[in-house]
Image: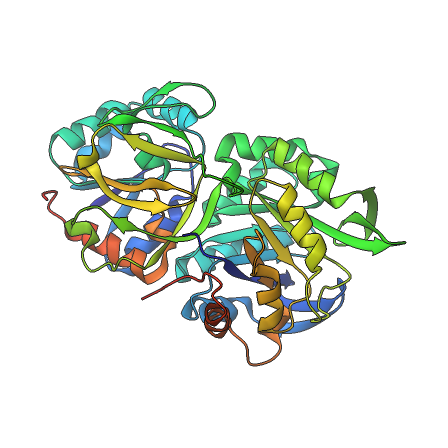
Amino acid sequence: MLKKRIIPVLLLKDKRMVKGKKFKDFKDTGEPKTAVRIYSAQDADELVFLDIDNNSSSLGNLIEIVKQASEECFMPLAAGGGISDINQVRELLKAGADKIVVNTSCVKNPSLIKEISKEFGEQCVIGSIDYKISNNLREVWIKSGKLNTNLDPLEHAKNLIKLGAGEILLNSIDRDGMMEGYDLEYADKVSREINVPLIVCGGAGNYMHLADLLNNTSISAAACASLFHFGDNNPIRARSYLKNLDIPMRMLK
Amino acid sequence: MIGIVDYGAGNLASVHNAFERIGEHSEIFEDSKLIDKYDRIVLPGVGSFSRAMHLLTSKGWKEAILNHINDKKPFLGICLGMQILFESGDEKGPCEGLGVIKGKVKLLNPSSYLKIPHVGWNNLLPSKEHPVMEGIKENIDFYFVHSYRCIPESKKVILSECDYGGKFVSSVSKDNVIGMQFHPEKSQPVGLKILKNFSNWDGKC
């Protein structure tokens, strides 16, 4: 039986790890290399690295961090942030990434998704969607939440899957860093309407929030950052909490 | 020494790093003529069946790999590297495989609402014992990421299955050849244990 995944997200800025609220007010949360070592020791199910600098030197930093991570830990690694051409994808894969997270280019240059999936397979592309609610309407925002595209997140997700995305990462900007729970009903609706695995991000503040997201839904994975950054929480405890609620979790031993 | 085949598809660093971690010397090599240098070969791979076969045939890998296997040296195929051991695949159009194991590769067809690709941690249902799988308990999870499944002609080659809305073959073995649909190099300590077993395996079972 396939298990549900708990995925720590590491946001990177100037070679450091950061975490903000609603994509703003970023606070330093430490050194990524140390975090990787700890998550590896805690047997996280997978790691996602997102570079939020989006400048010319930041890809180099991201590659360096992925390279170190792939030498340290033997789990799936996904990486992204400002990915705009196939050569960047090749470099990240060569450094040890297994999957590439594409966000802004999903809107600005959707053929990139097609290109990556053709060369490296659909399992290699995570289509990432950040959305915000205004006037009761959910809309896709790109450029780290700075530009509204007016696209509908579900329709956007379906398009990305058609182009070759093997997974979708759905992130609520309104809930980011607030630790008040996921956008449950919407995440469930998206998961029911798409045929690839859905990773949901934005809002986890305690283990109950993870359970609410994963219990009795077809959602594949819960991504979280603040939960593990702030407070005495870790993937081992999260797994055992969820296992007690009969949510299928991975067995290690 | 362990040779990791670099035919132009996939994340080879992880496999190499995993062998380094368990103290086994391995090399990634791009020239198929050098294959005799290695006493055991790993064929990783992501991407599509037809693209992988195109790359393998165009660079002399096909004969080199088949010779290595015929010499009874240990051989491990991971994920797509297991799938192309079969006779044919139909990912992005019908395509001939290496034909080491009789059977074909088809799209997963899980019942009900389950999603494709099959991504994440799932446990193996062993069909037989094998030196490479020694010490691995039944309920332990391994990392999978794939959309296609291997359908061998003979049940004898099935080493384990896996349940995803119905059973599919998750590993195969035939003489000195072993294939895994999951990624041992991405499955943390239990995966490293399998790679260690492979490093010590004499190719007999």
Which residue occupies the extreme right position in the image? A135
Task: Out of A79 and B140, give the one closest to the viewer.
Answer: B140
Tell me residue B65's x, y (percent).
Answer: 23, 29
Task: Out of A15 and A111, give the one closest to the viewer.
Answer: A111
Report the side of A110 relative to B173 (left or right).
Answer: right
Residue drawn 72% across and 40% down?
A156
Tell me residue A10's x, y (percent).
Answer: 59, 63
Task: Out of B137 and B79, give the one closest to the viewer.
Answer: B137
**Picture quadrant where residue A136 is located:** bottom right
- Residue A238 position (above or below residue A159): below
Report the side of B135 relative to A82 (left or right).
Answer: left
Tell me residue B102's x, y (percent).
Answer: 23, 26
Residue drawn 16% across and 49% down?
B130
Residue drawn 45% across and 53% down?
A76
Report the side of B13 relative to A26 (left or right).
Answer: left
- Residue A138 position (above or below residue B106): below
- Residue A251 position (above or below residue B133): below
